[in-house]
Amino acid sequence: MRVSRAQAEANRETVINVASRLFRERGFDGIGLKDLMQGAGLTQGGFYKQFDSKDDLAALASRRAMESTTRRWSSVAASSPDPLQGVIDLYLSAEHRGETADGCPLVALGSDAARQSEDIREPFQDGIKAHLEVLEELLPAAEHEEASSKAMSLLALMVGAVTLSRIVTDKNLADRFLETAIAEAKRLTAARIGEP
């Protein structure tokens, strides 16, 4: 049965959304096309009508995941009395640690993405730049170069802490990674730009 153009586009968006979650949950190589399409409620036969390859889908799904995270940060910042602290608290939380399918793709797929093609790495790079822009905007006014360096330090701290927190099996150690990162983020952001 032939589907309408609108239904085909809706199906394509569904596949991208499902792939965005499943790739974060299982990794790029941890799930095949059959399971991806099944997760979207579609048959594998329709895949190549929508996408050039699994890498094409991985790039689109990665972009969707990165954009979703950036929007989430912006939303939390807009609704928090202390926007920067709101983003830090959201990111460095036990809840985020447990969001393997919906959490930050840098944590879920970072090392996996580093081994992929440029087409797949590009959405991550764009997303990293967007994350840095959000952090720079939330940091106290300063010279661009100083705010940029602080934003990079903060992003690296946050991504590293959640990654390590997910890796370890000792819950107390996992919690300590997050708690220590929160304390360090507060120290980093409390220091006035331009001070050591």
Image: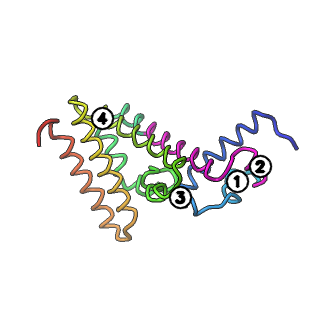
Q: Disc 2 residue type?
A: Gly
Task: Name the mark on residue 136.
Answer: 4
- Pointer 4 and pointer 3: residues touching (CB < 8 Å)? no
Name the residue tied to disc 3.
25
SS of the residue under disc 1? helix
Q: Disc 4 residue type?
A: Glu
Name the residue tied to disc 2.
46
SS of the residue under disc 3? helix
In this view, 64 is above or below 54: above
Judging depth in this view, the residue of 81 and 107 nearest the camera is 107
Choose the circle earlier in sequence order: 2 or 1.
1
Asked if residue 54 lies left or right of residue 194, the reply is right
Q: Disc 1 residue type?
A: Met
**Residue at image coords 56%, 47%:** 59
Query: Is residue 74 covered in magenta?
Result: no
Marks 4 and 3, Cα distance to the nearest angstrom? 29 Å
- Pointer 2 and pointer 1: residues touching (CB < 8 Å)? yes
Helix, strand or loop: magenta stretch: helix
Closer to the observer: label 3 or label 2?
A: 2
The range drawn in magenta is 44-72
Name the residue tied to disc 1.
37
Q: Disc 3 residue type?
A: Glu
Choose the circle earlier in sequence order: 4 or 3.
3
Residue 158: x, y in percent? 32, 51
Choose the circle earlier in sequence order: 4 or 1.
1
Marks 4 and 1, Cα distance to the nearest angstrom? 38 Å
- Category of crowding for the residue at label 2, using alpha-carbon neighbours closer than 10 angstroms: few (below 14), some (14–19), many (at least 20): few
